[in-house]
Image (cartoon, rainbow, N blue to C red):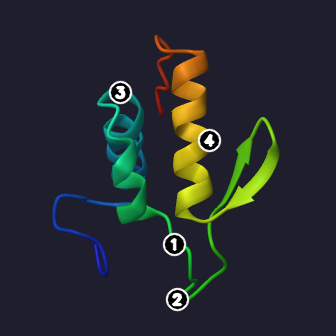
Amino acid sequence: MKGFAKKFKDLPDYILKITYQIWEDKDVEAIRDYYADTPTVSLPTPTRSPAGVIYGAEPVIEATYATLKMFPDRQLLAE
C-alpha cells in the first residue's frame, strides 16, 4: 500500500494491526508513530475521549493511559 509500511496490506489491515498493538499489546507510545500532530495532507486525527474530542498524538496518549488506568482489563477489538 503506497505510503504505508510493508507490514500493512491495506487500510483495514492497518487499522486492525495498530488497534491491536496500541490496546491489546498496551504499546501506547506507538500512537506517536500513527497519529499526526501536524497535518501533512489532512487535518490531525480527531479522537473521542471522555473529555470530548481531542487532536494530536500527545493528548491521545494521555487519554489512552487514563482509559487503561480506569479499565485495566479492557479489550478493544477492531473488526
Tell me the tag on residue 26: none
Q: Residue at x 57, y 15 (%)?
A: 71
Tell me the tag on residue 63: 4
Left or right of 76? Residue 29 is left
Neighbor class of circle 4 (other Cα within 10 Å; few <14, some 14-19, many 20+) is some
Front-lying residue, 36 or 77: 36
Measure how far apart labels 1 and 2 are at the Cα level: 8 Å
Tell me the tag on residue 36: 1
Whole-percent x, y for residue 45 in the image: 62, 65
Measure how far apart labels 3 and 1 are at the Cα level: 21 Å
Left or right of 50? Residue 30 is left
Q: Earlier in the sequence, mark 3 or mark 2?
A: 3
Asked whether the beta carbons under mark 1 and mark 2 sit within 8 Å of each other, the answer is yes
Name the amino acid, label 1.
Ala
Neighbor class of circle 1 (other Cα within 10 Å; few <14, some 14-19, many 20+) is some
Q: Earlier in the sequence, mark 4 or mark 1?
A: 1
- In the rendered image, which residue does mark 3 sit on? 24
Give the structural element (helix, strand or loop) at label 2: loop
Asked whether the beta carbons under mark 4 and mark 1 sit within 8 Å of each other, the answer is no
Measure how far apart labels 4 and 3 are at the Cα level: 16 Å
Q: Quadrant of residue 11?
A: bottom left
Q: Residue at x 55, y 38 (%)?
A: 64
Name the amino acid, label 2.
Thr
- In the rendered image, which residue does mark 2 sit on? 40
Q: Earlier in the sequence, mark 4 or mark 3?
A: 3
Q: Residue at x 35, y 27 (%)?
A: 24
Measure how far apart labels 4 and 2 are at the Cα level: 23 Å
Q: Earlier in the sequence, mark 3 or mark 1?
A: 3
